[in-house]
Image (cartoon, grey):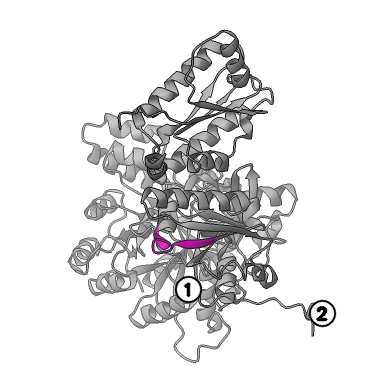
Amino acid sequence: MIIAQQKPIQEIAEMVKDCRKVLVVGCAGCVTVCLSGGEKETEILASELRIMRQLQENPLETVTFVCTRQCDPEYIAMLDNLVEDVDAVISLACGVGVQYIAERYPSKWVLPAQNTNFIGGSIEHGVWEERCGMCGNCILHLTGGICPIIRCSKSILNGPCGGSQYGKCEVSKDTPCAWQLIYDRMQSLGKLDKLLELQPPKDWSTSRDGGPRKAVREDVIIG
Amino acid sequence: MKTESKLESILNKGEFAVTAEIGPPKHSSPEAIKHHAEMMRDYVDATNITDCQTAIVRMSSIAAGLHVMKNGIEPIIQMTCRDRNRIAMQSDLLGAYSLGVRNVLCLSGDHQKFGNHPTAKNVYDIDSMQLINMVRRMRDDKVFLCGEEIKQAEPRFFIGAVANPFADPFEFRVVRLEKKINAGAEFIQTQCIFDMERFERFMEMVRQRGLHERVHILAGVTPLKSWRAAKYMQTSVSGMIVPDEIVERLKKAEDPKKEGIEICIEQIKHIRNIPGVHGVHIMAIAWEEIVPEIVQRAGLYPRPKAE
Amino acid sequence: MAEEFEPKIVAFCCHYCAYSAADLAGSMRLQYPSNIRIVEMTCSGNIDHRVILNAFEEGADGVYVAGCMEGDCHFLKGNYRAKKRVNHVKQMLDEIGFDSRRLEFYNLSAAMGPRFAEIANEMTQRIKELGPSPLNKKEGDTK
């Protein structure tokens, strides 16, 4: 899922300092699961902003709503009536949601309440970790199911580098060296010989730096 | 001879090579580099010019290499994968060669987190292994990384790489060294050696795989000025092993600097007797002026003349 | 002005401890301030950030949550969770400039009738010293 974390409340408050009424929109997708932008967090944020503004004797009116997903236009459409009289819309979705709302309501000031961090999963309740670098060209079959693109601090394809020691990455004693993990895994699979093959330079054109990427399924396109 | 590198010719003659390191300054004056080069000129075969070591902004290694060259030493340009993508790297390789640089050392580079710009975005478009291979293919196959032909004057570098016998997983270090040789590495400089026993085990595995006959290994040594320096390397520099005995020896010494030099000379003499080691790489960090004394007292002076 | 400020304090009390302790305090005829509005909960672990914030928005001058002694939660860990959550809300309140001393968490057992009264007194005293909630200022004047 997409892992996002809320921005500091002061930063959000600063964005809406000139507003009298705002719509605070949560998302029931990923950010609900990672406990940062679901129904509960949406109501808490609205409440915090109201309290802050009341303390400043400049009350803020809030309306809250939670979209099933903010990454599908049909769910955004449900905000049509709600956005009419607000000065701004605060989205607690990932960056996709913020942009979808902004696209649908060109005359509205749409603001992000979250920092979208990474694609990952939970490793325990309340702790999430990155697992996929979205490079668009998966190599997990070569690396024992452990992604060096995102889990190695240098995205090395022929690791481990000389900074790997005692199983940890040179950047931090808390960060496992992805290549040590790959080595261990390949060893237990009896496939260490695979690591002797020189992995050629990666084709990064499938990754983030070619403008927005698109995925198309012709067979399900209507019309 | 694949290249015009003096270092290559010395190594190919079977001479025990001596290289040192010059760190470019954090400013734009070449005076300190010139000074270090003049001082070391007769005592080393080539000097490494670091590439923004520990991710701290310094004068570019190619520019600094040029100053070294003007002062009579052959530079080994270090090139890390941290700051440049494949386009910039190839461009710099062409430029460096055009200026007369003949040796390049390919490495991943320290993560930017350790440097003075920890908020920078790193590149790591290609890794050190792929860089080695790219430099080789530019020379031997006369092609750019994309496969396009280099129509004339391909850069013909003597290709170096690094190996760290003190990083983990230990058993894989020699395998990875082989991978670097397969990719095109012709000489190897190791991480600073303090744990001689581990280095010997490493070299034993190197010999078992016959790698010492396919590549020139230059063992890295670092003279230490104080026990604090030793302790710092022991605890704060990743990929380094410093045995307690060395820390203790420096601690007990009346003159720690003198003791540091003694230790280094002993290490060099020891290393010379390890089969398969073809040279020594002296990394006198912020202590460049001590290199001539070490070379002389280790019995490595005078240096042979290149063809 | 002369009229003494009587704070409104909401106490979220666990059924298995604090709520029973309140009962006991009553049967023991112990005096505790009438400022406390008790809300019975099945477990302090049910407390929600939103409920606390709401209480303040709706006019509470102080709020506290009372759960079982550590290790004695009827649902094993509800009281630990409640404590963590309360601390988190305290942190939030500080961030938004609302004095977090108006919110507290206590541990007590069903047998601690006197302790219940003591807590009620302590909290009432604290809130009296802090004065009316800044969120009540305007309303307070007209009431």
Q: Give the residues drawn in magenta, as a range.
A: A14-23
Secondary structure beneath label 1: loop
Q: Position of residue B254 (x, y in %)?
A: 21, 31
Q: Could you tell me if residue C47 is visible in this image? A: yes
Residue depicted at x 42% and y 43% = C139
Give residue B261's quadrant in the image. top left
Query: In this figure, which residue is indicated by the disc labeled 2?
Result: A219
> What amino acid is labelled 2 in the image?
Asp
Q: Is residue A98 above or below residue C136?
A: below
Q: Is residue C52 above or below residue B87?
A: above
Left or right: residue A222 versus residue B188 is: right
Residue depicted at x 59% and y 32% = C81
Residue C40 colored in magenta in the image:
no
Q: Position of residue C59 (x, y in %)?
A: 47, 39
- In front here: A17 or B252? A17
Which marked residue is nearer to the observer: mark 1 or mark 2? 2
Query: In this figure, which residue is indicated by the disc labeled 1?
Result: B85
- In front here: B29 or A43? A43
Q: Chain of mark 1?
A: B
Which image quarter holds the C terminus of chain A?
bottom right
Q: Is residue B283 above or below residue B233?
A: below
Which image quarter holds the N terminus of chain A?
bottom right
Residue A21 colored in magenta in the image:
yes
Left or right: residue A106 versus residue B253 is: right
> What amino acid is labelled 1 in the image?
Asn
